[in-house]
């Protein structure tokens, strides 16, 4: 009996689950926070800084919000195990 073929993970999801993708999310989060706090003043600055917490947390805790949109898992370890 033939084995079912494993679904391939979208290249974007595979990259975001890699070490380079996690680093990119960390850097993007820090940059957004700094832009929000240092360059944009007032309420919009705080909004940008809070939005920057999302990619920062995604890099730290190894999850990818866009993974399920590409047919991959939510957690980086699950995406890496499928490649």
Image (tube, helix red, strand yellow):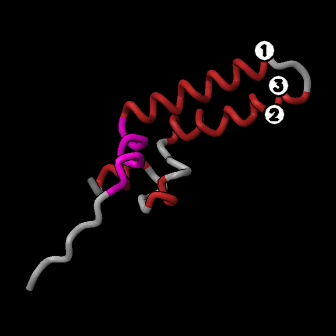
**Label 1 with label 3: CB-CB less than 8 Å:** yes
What secondary structure is marked by label 3? helix
Residue at mark 1: 39
What secondary structure is marked by label 1? helix
- Look at 78% across and 14% down and name the residue there: 39
- Look at 37% across and 41% down and name the residue there: 15
Q: Position of residue 55 (x, y in %)?
A: 59, 37
Judge left or right: residue 55 versus residue 36.
left
Q: Position of residue 61 (x, y in %)?
A: 51, 41
In the depicted structure, whether residue 63 falls above or below residue 1: above
Q: Which residues are magenta?
A: 9-18
In space, the residues marked 1 and 3 are separated at their CA atoms by 7 Å
- Look at 37% across and 33% down and name the residue there: 19
In space, the residues marked 3 and 2 are separated at their CA atoms by 5 Å
Q: Position of residue 80 (x, y in %)?
A: 32, 49
Residue at mark 3: 45
- Look at 40% across and 43% down and name the residue there: 17
**Label 3 with label 2: CB-CB less than 8 Å:** yes
What secondary structure characterizes most of the magenta part? helix
Bin the neighbour count of mark 2 within 10 Å (Cα to Cα): few under 14, some 14-19, many 20 and up.
Answer: some
In the depicted structure, whether residue 51 falls above or below residue 4: above
Q: Could you tell which of marks 1 and 3 lies nearer the N-terminus?
A: 1
The quadrant holding residue 51 is top right
Residue at mark 2: 47
């Amino acid at each position: 009996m033939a084995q079912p073929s494993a679904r391939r993970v979208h290249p974007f999801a595979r990259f975001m689950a890699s070490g380079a993708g996690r680093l990119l999310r960390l850097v993007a989060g820090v940059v957004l926070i700094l832009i929000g706090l240092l360059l944009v003043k007032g309420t919009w600055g705080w909004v940008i800084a809070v939005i920057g917490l999302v990619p920062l947390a995604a890099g730290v805790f190894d999850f990818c919000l866009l993974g399920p949109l590409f047919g991959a898992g939510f957690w980086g370890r699950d995406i890496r195990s499928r490649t």
